[in-house]
Structure formats: structure tokens, C-alpha cells
Image: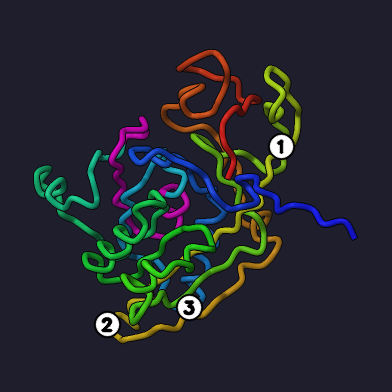
Amino acid sequence: MKRTGQNRSSAVMAQRHEALDSLDDFPTPCWATRALCEFLQAEDIGLHGRRVREPCANRGYMVRPLQEYAAEVIASDIFDYGAGYAVRDYLNPMSDLLDGDDDDGDDLVTNQPYRLSVEFVLEGLRRVPGVCAFFLRSNWTEGAERYHSLFHGNAPTFQLQFSERVILAKGRLLDPDRKYRFPIRKKPGQFEWRKPSTATSYSWFVWDPRRRGVWSDRTTIVWIPPGTRQALTRPGDYDVVGKVSARGDGLGDDGPGEADQNDFLGEVT
């Protein structure tokens, strides 16, 4: 039998390479947030009547579905994406105090920059009394450093593993049921029309407030079943919101500003 080399593509290897000062601009599909909210409701720790903090609000793709479940969403981001949210650095509590707003709400739900994931989790657990939920690649569970700094004795209560692929694209959301014009790898100037896809697996990592402060190194894995995307997708979920720059954020080919909705020249992960 002929042996083939390991596929080293960035998608298959569940990696993406962002600069250390990158905003890590990969917004979360709305249906993925609704899947979390539905799970929390079923676990009797739902967001109904609660005030939820979203400190990495981006263009609001997570804020919008959270507003369907929570009484209020306190949205902010370190960068102004043009969606009207407060500009604050969540890892620097002084940025809230200087603005006269240190309201952390009851719960925390976010998709933070991957390289700062441990810092966001520790800060969230310190500041927020209720549910803390973080959207991350499923292989985030790996690594000795994360084990010692976070998981050992303070493991997440639940890992919600998506059975379907959740497609994250740089700078915007892509509808998995729609074809876009993608550049062909290693063929400059050539393009193909296809639906977006990914080999990367994602999960929600949830800390249940009912178990806060109890030493634990065990996590319950719950599978989000196939068909969830179709069941929880709503009209308008993939509309472009806020500022989108063409080459900088992977959309269009005419420089910053308005871009062709059919073009996607950026990275899918």
C-alpha cells in the first residue's frame, strides 16, 4: 500500500496564523450562539431575564442572537467595527472604570482572540458570577500550559461539541448554503465558485455557576447534533454589518470600502 504524507493544509491542521497584534477577526455564526442558548435553557441556567456581557462583540453577530434570549446584552470590543458598541479592553478593567462603566452583567458569552483565550477565561471567571461560555477550537483542551494554568482543578463544566462544521471566515460570515468566488490556491489570478467549507472543529466551553468554586478536573462532553444549523438559522443572519474592508478583511478586490458580496479573498478556518 502506498503511503501518503500527512496533509499539512492549515484547515486540516486546525491552525491559523494571526499576527500577535491581530484583532483575530473571525465572527461567530448566529446559529452557533443560539445552540449554546438552547442548551443553557435545557440545563435550567438559561439567559432569560439575565444581563449578558459580550466583550468581543465585533460586528454584533453574537450580540443579535443573545438578545433573543437575554434581557440585556452589554456589548463592547477593543476595536470599533462600526456597529455602535463601546470600545473597551476587557483584559484591562481600568478601561471600564475610566469610562464610568464597570458593569459586568450576570453572565459572559464570547468568542475571544484565540491567543488570549486563557486570559479571557480567567478574567471572566473572576468578574462574572453566572455562566461563562467561550467559543473555541475543540483542540483547545490540549496543552500542558493550559492544563496547569486553568483546567487542573477548574475544568469547564461542559464542552459542547458541534457535530456539524461551524465555518468561520475572516472579516465576515459566509452562508454554508451559498456559493462564493474563491481564489484557487497556488494559481494567482484564478478563481472558482464553491460553497465554503472547513476541516476545523469548534466547541463551546461552559463554566456552570452552580459548580463555581468546587474543585473539579472533569468536563461533561455534550454533542450538538446534526441539523442544528438548519434549525437555528434565521433570515438576515448572514447580512454584512458594520465596517468591512476589502483586502484587509478578506472581502472583495477593489480596496477598502464597499465590496462584492460574491467575492471572498480571505481565510476560512
- The Cα atoms of the two marked residues, 1 and 2, are separated by 45 Å
Residue 97 percent location from the top left of the image: 10, 49
- Amino acid type at circle 3 is Glu
Contact, CB < 8 Å: mark 3 with mark 2? no
Q: Position of residue 174 (x, y in %)?
A: 61, 38
Which residue is tagged 2? 213
Residue 204 to residue 247: above or below: below
- How far apart marks 3 and 1 lie (CA) works out to 34 Å
For the record, the magenta segment spans 63-84
Q: Position of residue 264 (x, y in %)?
A: 61, 28
The residue mark sitting in front, 1 or 2, is 2
* Marks 3, 2: nearer the viewer: 2
* Mark 1 vs 2, N-terminal side: 1
Mark 3, secondary structure of its residue: loop
Residue 252 circle label: none
Q: Name the residue tied to disc 1.
A: 178
Q: Which mark is residue 43?
A: 3
Residue at disc 2, secondary structure: loop
* Viewer-nearest residue: 40 or 13: 13
- Residue 109's image quarter? bottom left
Mark pair 3, 2: CA separation: 19 Å
Q: Amino acid at mark 2?
A: Gly
Quadrant that contains the C terminus? top right
- Closer to the N terminus: mark 3 or mark 1? 3
Residue 193 point in image, percent of width and height:
75, 29
